[in-house]
Structures are given as structure tokens and as C-alpha cells.
Amino acid sequence: MEILNDYGIVLALAGAVLAALIPGMASAKAVSMGGIAGAGVITEDPAQFGKVLILQLLPGTQGIYGLLIAFITLSQIGILGGEGDISFVKGALYFAACLPMIIVGYTSAVRQANASVASIGVVAKKPDQFGKAMIFPAMVETYAILALLISMLAVNGVSGLSI
Amino acid sequence: MALLQMQRINIYALKKDRKQILELLQRKGVVEVRDMLKEDKVFNRSDVSHAKQIMEKNISTVNEALSILNNYVKENSSILSALEGRKELAVEVYDSFKEKYKPAVGTAKRIIELSKIIAENKAEVLRLQTQIEILTPWINLDIPLNFKGTKHTTGYIGILPNSWTLEEIYEKLAQFMPLNVDIISSSKEQTCIFVLCTKDNKNKVYETLRGMEFTLPSLSIDLSPSEQLEQVKKQVEEANNRIKAATDEMISYDKLRDELKFLLDYDTMRLEKYEVIGTLLQSKNVFIISGFIAEKDIKSLEEELTSRFDLAIETKEPRKKDDVPILYKNNGFSEPLEGTVNSFSPPGKGEMDPTMVMSLFYYALFGLMLSDAGYGFIIALACAIGLIKFRKTIEKPMKNTLKMYMFCGIATVFWGIIFSSYFGDIFDVVGKTFFGVTDLPVIPPVWFFPVEKPMLMLTFSMAIGLVHLLTGLAMKGYQLAMQRDYKGIIYDVVLWYILLISGVILLLSMEMVTGILGININIPSNVVTIAGILFALAAVGIILTNGRESKQPFKRILKGLYALYGISGYLSDVLSYSRLLALGLATGVIGSVINQMAAMAAKGALGPIIFTVIVIFGHALNLGINALGAYVHTNRLQYVEFFGKFYEGGGKEFKPFGINTKYYKIKESWKNGNIK
């Protein structure tokens, strides 16, 4: 058990890195889906660029939320600051705290991209309905925000535990 | 917080004045024309589809011409030109355009023709250039490429693949002597040869040559290659000259660009006019315009029309079943958000204009989500500069957009100061890195750092959400009062208010809840008891009344129970405001990350420069992404959580018959208060 405690930091770092990695990958895919749909609209009607760009960027936020969790974690496990002495249990707790963002970030980005692509279709046909079209992808994002919130509170909470 | 009172208007006028009256109405832009009257034996509508077709065709021609012209002569326009708005022109210019109309249409057609000429000639040049490429290796041959031989000889002119020497060719053809082989030109890829043999051997020679993969040149001409080349080059020059002439002519039309733009607008206006004419009821001498007008505009329009024409105007209250268009009336603070309400849906029948109340929350919520004084300052400053610089010409929608972001920016500065966020923590980082300041933070927050007390921030976010939702519920009460549904106010609003507020008090009295939220409130026990009783009473009231549209008692109670279950909806609505915390923290933390990265790179002599570059790029990115997030999620909170409580929309926006042009607008010229 004593030896395991040396590896606490590894678990914590794995959580942080995966939080940046997996939602980032998903957002990259999501934004490219929006970009492909958007490029089609722009060939027909270049004036819609601004609206299409917003819709394309919407599912890009998961990657940023992931980065945020990664950074908060890094800054508390002694890599970018904070205490370096992480026990095995604490490392595992950090890993668990990152999980909501890792998993929900991944799935919600891709699903939000589906909604974004559909909304880009709306803008192509009815540019004046942009306000409504924007809400559909934003609904999906709610769950990424909730995951971000829990991950953020959990990481903060874990740092206060003395185990 | 209001909508303008609309009136039905009918204008009865003489047909001889039709053009002038319609044009005046179009310039005033205060009447929405609707065909609400029925045709009869005397009055009917005329068919204008033919005239409309001509104008639509003209419009598309001019649009095409303008975009072609823009390919040849770029219009110098800056990014800011979108703020400049349309140019204003006097009526006289509009009226005098009739003479220029035909030439302008001609110009547009000529531009399209020229672009075709240029394209055709470019294709011609390409074709000729391939000919030149084919001919060039044959330049030393002084007989035509289609030379077949003389009386006793046969000539073969063609190409062998790869490089051949004379010896190699003679070697292959040795058995067919006498013959003559000339190598016209030779390169790595191909060898151009001329073989002359006796007529008896011609088939065998040809077969041998074929065996060497001999091919005939792809051109067959009567002139010698050099002469032909000369001719082709001349043709290329001619084609190039035609292209240049056409391009020059095209460029010369740059000075007519304004005329083309005006033509586009002129026909756009005429098209709209004809659309209106198509809806008018007309007899032999009289026509009737029917539609809607805002009550405040009636007087001035009436004065203006009756002073100039013989006509009769009749206005009356809209009928119950009329689909009355919506025109907002708001002060400068709320007006920018009319567009946001419109893009949800204009208020439906019996609904109020939510813009004013919404605007208070809109700016505050946007500010909370972006919550950085530096970013807010940049947004507000940029919008203010745009508004001041183009204050004379800026169009209304653009002005409203800028104003909206300016107010959003100001709110962002406010929250940024409360939570002490200035480009993340730029002051701390700069102080620590460059000036060795140890007394951090440099600027302490007015209230607290959300990063340090996230639970307090979460509580605050949800409290704001609760206020927002209760305001929405109050708006519902106001709407019910306007409809004189007083029972509805008590059952659907007051009971819910009691339920929600007593519910919150009960929650706050639980140690578990205050423990999670990290707040310390002591609620006296008798207050808790009263809240408990009120909660139960309100719940019973809701169960008994909220299913009141059903007559059957059992069904009614069930519906009431289901309505009470709606309290879970309030719970999820309030939790939805946690995004205020999440997005606010995201801005601040990413900002700090950027600053920290910049500080890590800020060592050595070049340090401050690298630091500045990283900070500028990083914060520009962060501002862009988080402003987008704040905008989208503010809209969501308004549309879904707030509007969900009272607002359905479904109205129709007021679309007056007016000047919906792209480049110019027409201004009435006034002299001594009268129209000239």
C-alpha cells in the first residue's frame, strides 16, 4: 500500500490529461462537422457566414471546459502548483472527479454537433430563424455545463480532503 | 414596455394619383398594406405578375453585373463599412432617374455580355496555346504537316516516343532503302521525324514505324509549321487584344457603379410597389388601399395626403379576428432587444411586450457569464466608438446591435469589478512577474473571488435564477390581469408564489441544504412553521384549482396533482442557472491560464514583448469564445426559462410598405415645413 501511494499522482495526472484529451478530440470532430455543413451554406450564400460560424463554434466549448478541468487539476496536484504529495486514494479521487467532464464532454460535443448541423440547415433555408436555430444546440450544451460544474466542484473539494 | 396601438386604415383615392400616393406611402413607410377587402363587380384586383417579372429579371441582371464588376474592379470597402448604412438621396434624384433607367439597364446587360466575351476569348487563347505547343517542335520543318508524298515517294511525318538518334532509326529501316530520315527535333520525351520512302515500300515502312510506336501529329494543316505558328500567334494576340478591350471597357464602367446600385434599388422599390398594387382594389377611376397603421402616425399621414391629393381616409379599431401586426415602443435601453424578442416570436394576442423586463435581466446575465471588467470594457468601448463615429448614417438594426453589446459590455464591467477579474488576473501576474509585488491581490474584489468560493457563487447564481423565474411568473400575473382573468391570477400565480417562496424558506431551514451551499442563515423556528403551513395550503390549493378546465372532479384532481408536479420543473429551471457560475469561472480561469503561460515565457530581455504578444492573442481568443457562450446562453435563459413562464408569442411583426433597399434610401425634401 505504501508503494501504491507513489502512484497517486499518476492517477491524478491521468484524470487531468484525459479531461483535456477526450473532450478536446470530441470538440475537434464536432467543430469539423459544423464546418463541413457550414462550408456548403457559404458557397450558396456567403452573407450567412457570421451565423453559420456561431453555430459551428457552439460544440467547440466542450474542449475548452475539458481544458479548464485539466488546468484546475494540474494546479492542485503539484504540477502547475499546489501540494505535490498525492496519496493513492486522493489520486483516484481526482481521477473520479474528472470523469463527468471526460465522459459527458465527449458524448455531448458530438451530439451537439448533430444539432448544430441541423440548425445550420435551418439558417441555409431561413436565415431569419437564426435565433431559434441557435437554441437547439445550446440545449445540448446544458449537460456539458452541468458536468463541468460537478467536475469543478469535485476537484476543488478533493483538494480540501486530507487523505 | 409597450406595444403601439394599431388601427385599420382604408384610403380611397383617384387612380390618376395612384403613382404619387403609393410613392409617398412607400417613402413614409408607416402603413402595412393587407388585402382585407373582398372583390366585387366594380372593384377588383389587377394582375401585375408580368410587370413584376420584368423587374425581378432586371434585379437579378443588375446583381449579376455588380458582382462581375466587383471581380474586375474591387470596391474599396472596409470592415467598418457595414456600420455606415445606406446613402441618403433626395426625392428629386429618384424622380429624375427615369431618364437614366434604360441606359443603366443597358450597362448592366453590357457588363454581363463583356464578361462572356472575356471568358470566350480566354478559352480561345487556351486552345491556341495548345496548338502552339504542338507546333513548336515542328518549327524547322519547311513543308506542311499533312504532306503525304510526291508521285513516287511517300512521306511520313510523325512522332516517336523517347529520344532516338538518326543511326538508330536508319538501323530499323535499313531494309527499305532507299529512304531519307530527318530528325526535326528531339527531346527526352519525343523525337519528331520526317521519313521519305519510295511508294513500293510505303506499307512496310509504315508497319515498321508503327512497331516503333510512331504516331501522327494531332494537327493536320496545309501550311508549313512555321507559317502556321506565325498565324496562331497572331490569333492569340488578337484574342488577347479583344480581352484587353473588353476588360478596359469593363473597368470604365466602374464609374457607373453607383448608377447600377441605384438601378437595383429603384427596381427593388418598384417591385415592392407593384406587389402592393396587386393587392389594391381598383375600379375604373378609384382605388382603395387597406392595411394597418400605428395610431400615432395617422394624423401626420392624413395631413400630408389630404393636402396634396383628393382622397378620403378612414381609420377604425381592428376587429377581433384581425391578425393585427406588432409594433414595439421601448426606450433606448430596452429597444436593442426587440430583435431578440422578435427572433423568438413577436407577442401573440393578449400578450404583453416582454422587452423592457427582459432587458434588465439580459444585460445582467450576459455580464455575469462573461464577468471580466477588461473584456467588458473592450466590448463597450468598441461599440461606443462605432455608435459615435457613424451616428449620422448608421442603420437602425446595426445601431441596436451595437447598443445591445454596449450595454452588455457595461454590465460585464460591473460584474468584473464585483468579482475582481481584469483580463483574468493580469494585474497580479504583471505585478508579480515584472515588479516583484508580493501583496496580492493587487485589486481585491468588491465582494469575493468566485474561484475561491464556488459554492457561494453557485448559491448566488441560483438566487438570481429564482428572481428571474419569479419575475416571469409575475409577468404572467400581469398578463392575466390585462385579460381580466382574476381567478387565474390567484390560482396560477399567487398560489405558486406562496408555494415557491415557502418552499425556499423550508429548504433553507434544513441543515443539509445550507451545509451544501456553504451559507449560514438562521431562520426563526416559527417562521419555518408558518412556511410549512403555507406550503401545504398552497399545494392543496394548486391540486384543487390548477385542473379547473376539467369538469369531472376526479380528472380535475389528477390534473391538479400533475400541475403540482410542475414544481420539479422549477427545480431544474433554477439549477439551469448554474451555468452562470460555470461560464463565469470558465472566463476567469482560462484568462488566468493565459496570463500564467505568458508569465512563464516572460524571462530574459525579450520577456515583456513575448508576454504582451501571448496576452493579446490569448485574451482575444478567450474574449471571442466566451462572449459567444455568454450570448448564446443568455438567449437560452431568456427563451427557455424566462419565456417559458408566461410568453408564447405567435404575433406578426409590423412590416410596413417602405423602402427596403440595399444601397440608398430616399429622403423627402422639406422646405418650410412643406413637401416640395
Image (cartoon, rainbow, N blue to C red):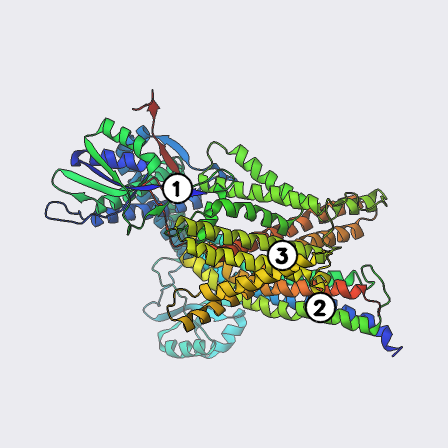
Front residue of B445 and B204: B445
- Of marks 3 and 2, the one in the foreground: 3
Indicate left or right for A83 with A73 as reference: right
Front residue of B189 and B69: B69
* Residue that badge 2 annotates: A98
- Of marks 3 and 1, the one in the foreground: 3
Q: Disc 2 on helix, strand or loop?
A: helix
Q: CA distance from mark 3 to mark 2?
A: 24 Å
* Residue that badge 3 annotates: B462
Residue A152 sits in quarter: bottom right
Indicate left or right for B309 with B502 as reference: left
Q: Where is residue B512 shown, x and y percent of the image?
A: 71, 65
The amino acid sitting under disc 1 is: Lys
Indicate left or right for B619 with B252 as reference: right
- Asked if the residue at tag 2 contacts the one at tag 3, i.e. Cβ–Cβ closer than 8 Å, the answer is no
Q: Where is residue B153 shown, x and y percent of the image?
A: 36, 70
Q: CA distance from mark 3 to mark 1?
A: 45 Å
The amino acid sitting under disc 3 is: Met
Is residue B143 visible to us here? yes
- Please give the chain letter of the residue carrying mark 3: B
Front residue of B581 and B117: B581
The amino acid sitting under disc 2 is: Cys
Front residue of B104 and B22: B22
Q: Residue at x 61, y 38 (%)?
A: B381
